[in-house]
Image: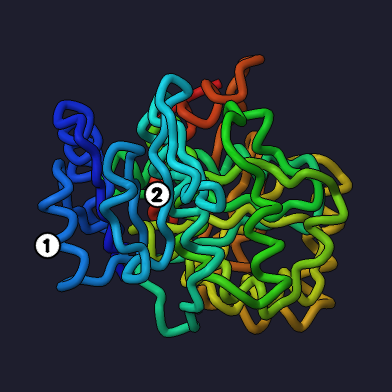
Amino acid sequence: MRVKLLIATSDTEYAKLLSDHISENHADCIEISVCNTSECLRETLPSRRFDAALIDAALIESADLSSIRLPMLLWSEHEAAAEATGELVRMNKHQRISKIVAAVLERYAKISNSRHGSDSKIANITTVWSPAGGVGKTTVALAYASAKISDDKKVFYLNLEDFSSVPGYFSENGKSISTVFEMLDNNDGNVKMLIQGICNRENGITYLCSPDNYDDMCILTPENITELSASCAELADELVIDLSSACDARTRQAFEVADKVLIVTEPTITAKAKLAQFTSQNDVFEGIKEKAVFVANKGAVINETLTEHIISFPLVQSTDASEVYKALSEISFAQGAQPLVTS
């Protein structure tokens, strides 16, 4: 679905700047029409319906807003607006265009009734998990994501840990993933469009900022996991889901939607013991065994009688978390691959 957006402003230079940016960066989700005069606006609106519109103060009185689902006033503090615009959403034109686009998509997502089912999936989905915490799971997830970017894939990283690792790896200058959780909880709105509006991109990886608080993550249901994964998968070639170490209903649902499950361990006694318990005592492992790949992180050794699908990662000495996952991304994630970097 593409949002039909009307840009109506007498400032032709600004209209071109705005429309060019959207065409270059958001053509997959926004279809643009532009009007620069009252005459053009009066001719266009009766013949077409628009999902959203950005209309400046000079043209707003010429606009029949009945054919626009989400009309917004494109305004500046230096411009006077007619009294009739009092109830309209106001969009400040003097801000980064990327923020304007994000705000349009976010606002329209909240009034759109389009939902996404499990048949919407496009991306290959890889979940990254471990029965033990602190084994380098997030580093492995981002190394995998970075490796896929090197293969010219569009990658979405979705962190669903109880306590998010996102702030340790990315700048958080966008809206929280809690906004998405709220829409899922209310079962209303277009989740995919909302994600398009609030996601960030850094080092080639698309991601969502961490929750506002711990309780926000706790409201997710297994059904929410399915819809959230499907919505993110529509926006990428590869979706990498970073999970908490629990093996609860939400984790099992993430395993269910995944094409591949990376199971991470390290050389510590605790990690070895928990992995042994999971593989020998938990029937969940039997259900994912065929799509499971074990990642022996930091030089760990995995019993080859357990599986042939093992990737060995060396220990990379660095205090910069981003440098670690970038170094590890140079290792092939093909099953049975040998490490290409050394500690």
Provide the residue designation for mark 2: 155
In the displayed orientation, state which residue is furthest to the front. 83
Quarter holding the N terminus? bottom left
Left or right? Give the position of 29 relative to 304. Answer: left
Give the x, y percent position of residue 343: 56, 21
- Mark 2 vs mark 1, CA separation in Å: 42 Å
> Which color mode does the image show?
rainbow
Q: Can residue 199 be seen here?
A: no
Q: Secondary structure at mark 1?
A: helix
Q: Which of the 4 quarters of the picture holds residue 45? A: bottom left
Q: Nearer the viewer, residue 248 or 50?
A: 50
For marks 2 and 1, the one nearer the N-term is 1
Give the x, y percent position of residue 288: 61, 77
Q: Which of the 4 quarters of the picture holds residue 13? A: top left
The residue sitting at 20% across, 41% down in the picture is 19
Of the numbered discs in the image, which one, if any, rests on residue 275? none
Q: Secondary structure at mark 2?
A: strand
Pointer 1 local density, CA inside 10 Å: few below 14, some 14–19, many at least 20: few
The residue sitting at 78% across, 57% down in the picture is 217
Left or right? Give the position of 170 relative to 55. Answer: right
Q: Nearer the viewer, residue 16 or 340?
A: 16
Question: Which amino acid, mark 2?
Answer: Val
Give the x, y percent position of residue 245: 79, 56
The residue sitting at 73% across, 79% down in the picture is 284
Q: Can residue 281 be seen here?
A: yes
Pointer 2 local density, CA inside 10 Å: few below 14, some 14–19, many at least 20: many
Provide the residue designation for mark 1: 43
| Vertical side of 42 occupied by 118: above or below | below
Front position among marks 2 and 1:
1
The residue sitting at 81% across, 66% down in the picture is 219
Question: Which amino acid, mark 1?
Answer: Glu
Give the x, y percent position of residue 41: 18, 54
